[in-house]
Amino acid sequence: DAKTTQPPSMDCAEGRAANLPCNHSTISGNEYVYWYRQIHSQGPQYIIHGLKNNETNEMASLIITEDRKSSTLILPHATLRDTAVYYCIVRPRGGSSNTGKLIFGQGTTLQVKP
Amino acid sequence: NAGVTQTPKFQVLKTGQSMTLQCAQDMNHEYMSWYRQDPGMGLRLIHYSVGAGITDQGEVPNGYNVSRSTTEDFPLRLLSAAPSQTSVYFCASTVGGGQGAVGYTFGSGTRLTVV
């Protein structure tokens, strides 16, 4: 499975956009990029995923580079409640024996400051 | 719609005791997984299942057993609890097969202390 690299921590001012980078240079053609976050000691929360096109939902936007070796999660207007650990994960598409296997790295701790 | 339900929420065990952590989902998800999270650390995959009757090991399977007799339930058994198994345990599920490109739903966790 492809590995991901994220900065250990980032700060963001409340109301500003938070841009969280992820490097996945060994990603293969059948692997999606997923983003989750974990607020304090709660269970992780799914945010967004993508294959090769940019994606947007009510929570965030995901920008994937053309070569798919890196991506950026964008929280357009960060609030204090967005303070969390953000995980970037690569996972095979459906039909692979590894599809059920979701491996977490260390993630990025995002601190949103007033 | 309850989602992923984990019981109990808190548990204290003595070293050597055994117990089962329960996980149930009502979303007809094929894939289910168990994770542990030690204080200040990330999540580590213990075991996972891609359907009833099918289980496989994750990153840290030693000391744990699982079975998947129904689609809804995926219990995690601690055979002989050790202090090193003190952790927060999360269960998660998602649809499987060709619809694998969907996010996992996580339970709220079971906080286990082994003394």
Image: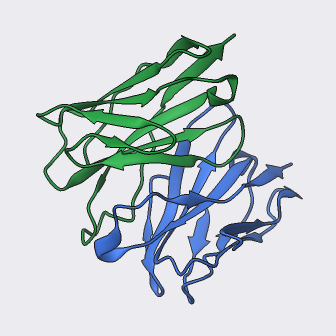
**Can see residue B14?**
no
Q: Residue at x 59, y 47 (%)?
A: A44
Q: Determine the image quadrant of residue A42.
A: top right
Q: Is residue A10 left or right of residue A19?
A: right
Residue A69, can we see it?
A: yes
Q: Colour of chain B?
A: blue
Percent x, y of residue B62: 54, 59
B29 displayed left or right of A97: right
Residue for point 25% across, 43% down:
A2
* Residue A48 image point, x, y percent: 42, 46
The one nearer the camera, A46 or B91, is A46
Camera-side residue of B70 and A56: A56
| Chain that appears green | A
Q: Nearer the viewer, residue A49 or B40?
A: A49
Residue A64 pos. (x, y %): 24, 35
Could you say where residue A94 lies in the image, as x and y percent from the top left? 28, 68
Quarter occupied by the C terminus of chain A: top right
Q: How many marks?
A: 0
Task: Judge from the rendering whether residue A80 lies leftward or rightward of residue B54; answer left or right.
Answer: right
Residue in the foreground of this view, choosing between B60 and B111: B111
Tell me the residue at 57%/55% (across/down).
B35
Vertical position of residue A1 compared to residue A111: above or below: below
| Left or right, A16 with reference to B6 | left
Q: Quadrant for residue A19, please give it.
A: top left
